Image (cartoon, rainbow, N blue to C red):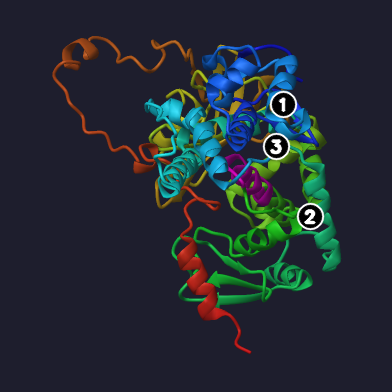
Amino acid sequence: MITADRPAPASATPDLDSEGGALDALTLGRRIREQRIRQGLTLEQLASAVDRAPSQVSMIENGKREPRLSMLRSIALALGTTVDDLLRTDAPNERAGLEIAVERAQRGPVFEALGLPTIRVSKGQSDDTLRAILGLHSEIERLHRERAATPEEARRANSQLRAEMRGRDNYFAELEQAASALLQAVGHAGGPVSQQTVSDMASHLGYSLHYVHDLPHSTRSVTDKRNGRIYLPVQQSASRDSRSPILQAFASHVLGHDEPGNYADFLRQRVETNYLTAAILLPEKDAVKLLTEAKNLRRISMEDLRDAFAVSYETAAHRFTNLATARLAIPVHFMKVHESGTIIKAYENDAVRFPSDPGGAIEGTTVCRNWTARTVFDVEDRFSPWYQYTDTTSGTFWCTSRIEKAKEGDYSVSVGVPFAHVKWFRGRETAHRAVSRCPDESCCRRAPGGLEEKWADQSWPAARTPTSLLAALPTGSFPGVDPTEVYQFLESHAPRA
């Protein structure tokens, strides 16, 4: 309720309530002005009637001051109307609505962030002028919303999601149940999941598979929900599992995903999609049985998990993190690191300390040169797994790591556990050991001996920085996808009546 004559807050939204709608000071002021003009009163005459200075009434009409309830009653009486009528939440007319919208926009965060001077809304400005101002303001707001897809926001979303994953030990029971239900629906009896089984799942969900030569270059698959079709590329990458694109294509249907409203939604949906895909390719019951037997024999191996289910090493490593703590009582960490040393993604619930920025983000930071994820790049034997113990400031960890290739370069995929749990793993006998004192710069970030003194002022390297580190992430509901290209593709391939 209105309690005192005081300046309106920046949002110009006092907690007045009339007929269920929130009333702001701008709307109240415009309704008072409209009634005054309708009654043929000047500002001075109304001010005299309510025993106030004209400047005070002017501030009320301009939405810059909230009147006390007693003052509002006096104004209503002087204008021959009621308090209830003045407290209506709708603008008195279309023009007043435009003026209110422009005033509200100028008091909002967009104008404030731009540092633009405010303009005085007057009768001399046409409706088209006010609409143009509102249109520009709306576009700037849209661009601000799209900033949600910048690297900074993406890193923040990654940090929040990783914290949730850690809190659940990276085990999502509802996604495990969804995968199990799909496998049962197509009669999967256990063991590896075949291409035919995956195709049967798509058919069970009402989708037919279509392999085409002209899939939009920005997509891995395109789903036509109207006609129940999933379009896939004819040529599959040799490094990709041909089953995964099909599973990922219908995962959104299974999981009930709506169009993402922001980058955090997009990221969460991608994580859930990848989780469901792995949970189908490595069914929980079968994977836990294999891993439990391996634990009892003290020979858990990512390679064995990979080979048993015919998946990539990275998929096997990811799946292990889902099941390790929840089903095997083993804390674990996972890292995917580019050959430059940059962390692409990581997960931990075993107290290992990943490098991070002041906001807690891990992605994009550089991992210690002495960690397994980096030393594996110096190993000549790329066929055998690389095992290593690393003494860190937060304890000793054992890791197993492999190199995988991608179009962006080589990556290491590493799985690690605290020293107390290495007894369950193949490779625990390794003699490879390193010491990491990071984030102490003397560990690996500072050149040894006199090299820094000799070359610091005499060198100028040209960094081969991936362009993705410098550019904002793609915007739109589905980052990186050209919607026009997708719609044109669907139109050209849609079945004709």
Badge 3 is on which residue? 89
Q: Earlier in the sequence, mark 3 or mark 1?
A: 1
What residue sits 45% from the left and 25% below the top? Answer: 112
**Distance from the alpha carbon under mark 2 to that under mark 1:** 65 Å
Residue where numbered disc 2 is placed: 179
Q: Please say if 264 is above or below 108.
A: below
Q: Which residues are magenta?
A: 261-274
Q: Quadrant of the C terminus?
A: bottom right
Q: Are marks 3 and 2 in contact (CB under 8 Å)?
A: no
Query: Residue 323's image quarter?
Result: top right
Task: Mark 2 vs mark 1: give the one in front.
Answer: 1
Mark number displayed over residue 76? 1
Q: Is residue 246 visible?
A: yes
Question: At x 41% / y 13%, what residue is drawn?
Answer: 443
Please state if 125 lies on the left or on the right of 263 as rendered. left
Q: Earlier in the sequence, mark 2 or mark 1?
A: 1
The disc placed on residue 473 is: none
Residue 197 horizontal/vertical position (percent): 74, 69
